[in-house]
Image (cartoon, coloured by chain):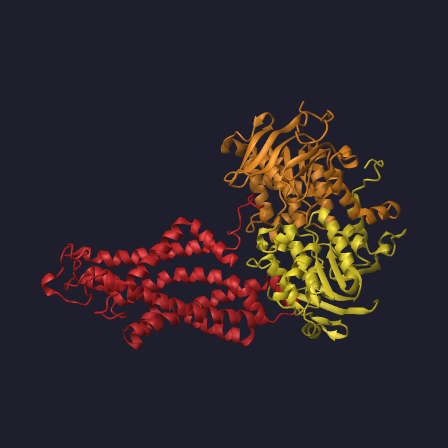
């Protein structure tokens, strides 16, 4: 299981701003994703997390470096493995087609891996149940649902095609904390035979779900460590960006146990 | 002295000595849809004193935002509020629009979740904030711009922010600009509606610190609406838990979070703990 | 199906829009069943009865050649509305297909289509229509083709920009990531979303096409005289305007009302087709 699945090497990306100026979003990013492993990508807003996700999904082309999946070029692999990739974005409003019903939406995921429309009705219900949505929602329009529900529809759609590479771009950030916990559980259950990149700015969530943590700061990967290393006795090997993130989170971290074991 | 009158909370409430007399008192506030009469917020009562912070927690759809809007009489069309909202003894809901307008800004202000849409994209932040100060505080142009610089400094933003347009700043910076505006206006009541959702760790800390500054330095009464229990716990003196538009628990922050009486509060605390369990364990051992 | 019902319900709720729709249907029906509704021949000249007043036999009077105005108005609905609808359908078809394809496939095809639209749009379309009809000679068919040629670039541009807007949507991104082809994405995602906007545009445009055809006929460039058409009727009434100004009223009012109805219907459609607005109002959500 512990095989390199996706290898990203020396990837660069620039965006043009104005006529002449080019802004470097990513400079020389290299890392690997393995099957059966959830990798967390942490970074402050504007650090290039989402750009990296779009490159990894083949929605944009890198300006330098290459992305290989199982040794093949990304686009070639994607064409050969329909439904092999899936993504859930943070912005749930545009994540579902406003004219689709929930069922059509999830069925699209099934269709991606070659299942026909007619024979999937029990399957859609099952997928919805997996993300904790009632079957009765199936013929509602997606837009009638709340944000949390839409996001779960997107997760169901993503799981439907049994992807081998799943990218979650801040997918849980807009959910309630109580839902986040459930989805984290689900994700860890599903992650067995896929490589998952979990992009977030919430270090608490990342430390719960991920086995490895990448930190992206100003277009560079500054840390690539197992999650346990975050909390090691001496934080000397961690980058300043990661340490700042840890500190900031701790200031406003809930400490229920600390205040007497009342709860 | 106002005691929380919550008909739905189980058990009696301890009398809590609020620091100072309450600035805002809400009695049996309900929000309903005008056409269908559906009740979205059901008879919620609360009180906030100057220099204290009330945290309102609950899941999305529990009516947190609507309750806040009702307190400021800013409900969207089609919704109607009933009950009493007393701001220093005056009933806000019974006021005319004109009277309410004079109350806004100087006395009450709102920090919203969507920082991007809160400012005019065509003007620099400095101009907008200064215009606010001129209008509400009757300052001259120079004085207003000086004030902008001062308040930006107080929320830990560099002065160049005043020359920036909203799209040039991150969400966290805009949130802090909103907080800075409230700071400059000297608002006595600030309602912060999910100010830290979708912010990264550093911006979240900065925004919360800025809000905390309002409470401790300026004696502002703060209503902090959030589903982020960690933030509410560190900020709030009193906590109100909403579920499906009803108040299920209301009381001192320590008591509510550490010895929750209602099943729903226990559920919220439990999920929060589950989520930060790994982190909290390490934070205690490794981080300190 | 659900969506169709939702749109219908939203349209039903809009009283002005519904009234406009009913009115337009009535006018169309009146045009179609003109022989049943009027006993008079719109072309029958009766020189003894010129410029006659309203009587039981001639409800709206007779024109300068003694023809029954009501009959001409009814038969004119056929020509005017029929021509306007045909022009609209042709332009929408050509324009939106090219625009959608340009937005989806980009590249050389996109640049080609866009350059052509830019050339056509750099002239005021009324002037261009006049010039084309002037060159090809007056007549109904020439007016039709001139209108189509001048109008399709608008649809192409709108359809293209809609497509580009939808390309950035996350659901299109998902479909691309999942490996669906561009054609599939165009048919499954973009077409249903864009169709609403295009339908609105088409309805609003119907009004201006009607005006343009009437204007051409009024100037004697479009539908030729003996054939009843509202613009031609207006042109004929103009000749006797000083002494008999009320002759202008029937065709003028017909044009005014139909154009207004198309505009109201367009607005109502826009509201009804907006996926966000057909949602239950906040708070009604179960």
Residue farthest to the top, as pictured:
B1
Classify the position of the C terminus of chain C by image quarter. top right
- Where does residue B26 sit, x and y in percent of width and height? 62, 30
Residue farthest to the left, as pictured:
C48
Instruction: Please give the letter of the chain rendered in yellow.
Output: A
B235 relative to B49, above or below: below
B266 relative to A27, above or below: above
Frontmost residue, C39 versus A78:
C39
Q: In the image, A80: left or right of C209?
A: right
* Residue B146 visible in this rendered orientation of the protein: no
Residue farthest to the right, as pictured:
A233
B16 relative to C177, above or below: above
User: Which quadrant of the figure has residue C135?
Assistant: bottom left
User: Which quadrant of the figure has residue A227?
Assistant: bottom right
Please name the residue shown 58% across and 68% down the image.
C185
Instruction: Please give the letter of the chain rendered in orange.
Output: B
Count of marks overlaid on the render: 0
Instruction: Please give the letter of the chain rendered in red.
Output: C
Frontmost residue, B26 versus B249:
B249
Frontmost residue, C197 versus B175:
C197
Frontmost residue, A22 versus B249:
B249
- Where does residue B234 sit, x and y in percent of width and height? 76, 39
User: Which quadrant of the figure has residue A115?
Assistant: bottom right
- Where does residue A93 sit, x and y in percent of width and height? 60, 55
- Where does residue A53 sit, x and y in percent of width and height? 70, 63
Q: In the image, B274: left or right of B51?
A: right
Q: In the image, C55: left or right of A211?
A: left
* Residue C213 visible in this rendered orientation of the protein: yes
């Amino acid at each position: 299981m512990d095989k390199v699945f996706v290898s990203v090497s020396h990837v660069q990306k620039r965006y043009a701003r104005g006529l002449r100026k080019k802004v470097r979003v990513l400079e020389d990013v290299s890392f690997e994703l393995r099957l059966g492993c959830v990798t967390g990508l942490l970074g402050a807003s504007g650090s290039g997390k989402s750009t990296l996700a779009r490159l990894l999904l083949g929605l944009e082309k890198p300006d330098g470096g290459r992305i290989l999946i199982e040794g093949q070029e990304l686009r070639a692999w994607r064409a050969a493995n329909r439904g092999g990739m899936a993504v859930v974005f943070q912005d749930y409003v545009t994540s579902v087609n406003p004219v689709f019903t929930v069922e059509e939406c999830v069925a699209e995921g099934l269709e991606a891996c070659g299942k026909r429309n007619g024979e999937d009705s029990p399957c859609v219900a099952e997928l919805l149940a997996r993300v904790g949505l009632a079957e009765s929602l199936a013929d509602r329009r997606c837009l009638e649902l709340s944000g949390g529900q839409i996001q779960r529809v997107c997760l169901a759609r993503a799981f439907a095609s049994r992807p081998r590479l799943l990218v979650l771009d801040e997918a849980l950030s807009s959910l309630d904390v109580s839902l986040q916990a459930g989805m984290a559980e689900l994700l860890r259950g599903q992650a067995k035979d896929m490589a998952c990149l979990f992009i977030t700015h919430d270090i608490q969530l990342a430390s719960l779900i991920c086995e490895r943590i990448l930190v992206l700061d100003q277009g560079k990967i500054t840390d690539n460590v197992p999650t346990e290393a975050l909390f090691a006795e001496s934080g000397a090997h961690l980058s300043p960006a990661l340490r700042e993130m840890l500190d900031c989170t701790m200031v406003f971290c809930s400490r229920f146990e600390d205040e007497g074991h009342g709860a | 002295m106002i005691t929380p009158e919550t008909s739905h909370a189980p058990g009696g409430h301890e009398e809590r000595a609020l620091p100072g007399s309450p600035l805002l008192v809400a009695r049996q506030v309900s929000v309903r849809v005008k056409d269908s009469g559906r009740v979205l917020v059901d008879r919620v009562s609360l009180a906030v004193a100057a220099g204290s912070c009330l945290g309102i927690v609950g899941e999305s759809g529990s009516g947190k935002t609507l309750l806040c809007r009702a307190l400021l009489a800013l409900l969207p069309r089609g919704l109607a509020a009933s009950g009493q909202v007393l701001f220093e003894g005056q009933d806000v809901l019974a006021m005319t629009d004109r009277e309410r307008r004079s109350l806004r800004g100087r006395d009450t202000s709102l920090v919203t979740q969507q920082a991007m849409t809160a400012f005019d994209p065509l003007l620099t932040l400095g101009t907008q904030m200064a215009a606010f100060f001129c209008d509400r505080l009757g300052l001259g142009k120079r004085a207003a711009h000086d004030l902008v610089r001062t308040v930006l400094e107080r929320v830990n933003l560099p002065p160049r922010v005043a020359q920036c347009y909203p799209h040039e700043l991150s969400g966290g910076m805009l949130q802090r600009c909103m907080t800075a505006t409230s700071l400059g206006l000297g608002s006595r009541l600030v309602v912060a509606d999910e100010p830290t959702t979708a912010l990264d760790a550093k911006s979240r800390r900065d925004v919360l610190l800025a809000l905390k500054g309002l409470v401790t330095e300026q004696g502002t009464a703060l209503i902090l609406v959030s589903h982020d229990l960690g933030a509410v716990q560190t900020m709030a003196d009193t906590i109100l838990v909403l579920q499906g538009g009803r108040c299920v628990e209301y009381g001192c922050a320590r008591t509510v979070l550490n010895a929750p009486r209602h099943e729903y509060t226990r559920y919220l605390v439990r999920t929060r703990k589950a989520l930060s369990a790994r982190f909290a364990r390490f934070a205690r051992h490794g981080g300190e | 199906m659900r969506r169709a019902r939702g749109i219908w319900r939203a349209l039903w709720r809009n009283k002005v829009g519904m009234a406009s729709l009913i009115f337009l249907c009535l006018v169309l029906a009146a045009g179609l069943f003109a022989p049943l509704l009027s006993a008079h021949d719109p072309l029958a000249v009766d020189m003894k009865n010129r410029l006659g007043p309203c009587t039981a036999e001639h409800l709206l009077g007779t024109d300068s050649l003694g023809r029954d105005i009501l009959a001409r108005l009814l038969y004119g609905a056929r020509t005017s509305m029929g021509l306007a609808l045909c022009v609209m359908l042709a332009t929408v078809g050509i324009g939106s297909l090219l625009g959608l394809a340009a937005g989806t496939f980009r590249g050389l095809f996109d640049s080609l289509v866009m350059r052509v639209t830019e050339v056509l749009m750099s002239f005021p379309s009324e002037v261009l229509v006049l010039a084309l009809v002037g060159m090809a000679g007056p007549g109904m068919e020439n007016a039709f083709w001139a209108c189509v040629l001048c109008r399709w670039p608008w649809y192409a541009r709108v359809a293209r920009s809609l497509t580009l807007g939808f390309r950035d949507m996350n659901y299109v991104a998902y479909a691309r990531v999942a490996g669906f082809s561009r054609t599939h994405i165009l048919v499954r995602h973009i077409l249903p979303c864009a169709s609403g906007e295009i339908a609105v545009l088409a309805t609003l445009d119907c009004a201006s096409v009607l005006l343009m055809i009437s204007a051409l006929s009024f100037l004697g460039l479009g539908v030729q005289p003996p054939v009843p058409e509202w613009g031609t009727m207006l042109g004929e009434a103009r000749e006797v305007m000083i002494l008999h100004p009320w002759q202008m009223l029937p065709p003028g009012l017909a044009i005014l009302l139909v154009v207004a109805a198309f505009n109201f219907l367009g607005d109502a459609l826009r509201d009804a087709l907006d996926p966000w607005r057909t949602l239950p109002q906040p708070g009604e959500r179960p």
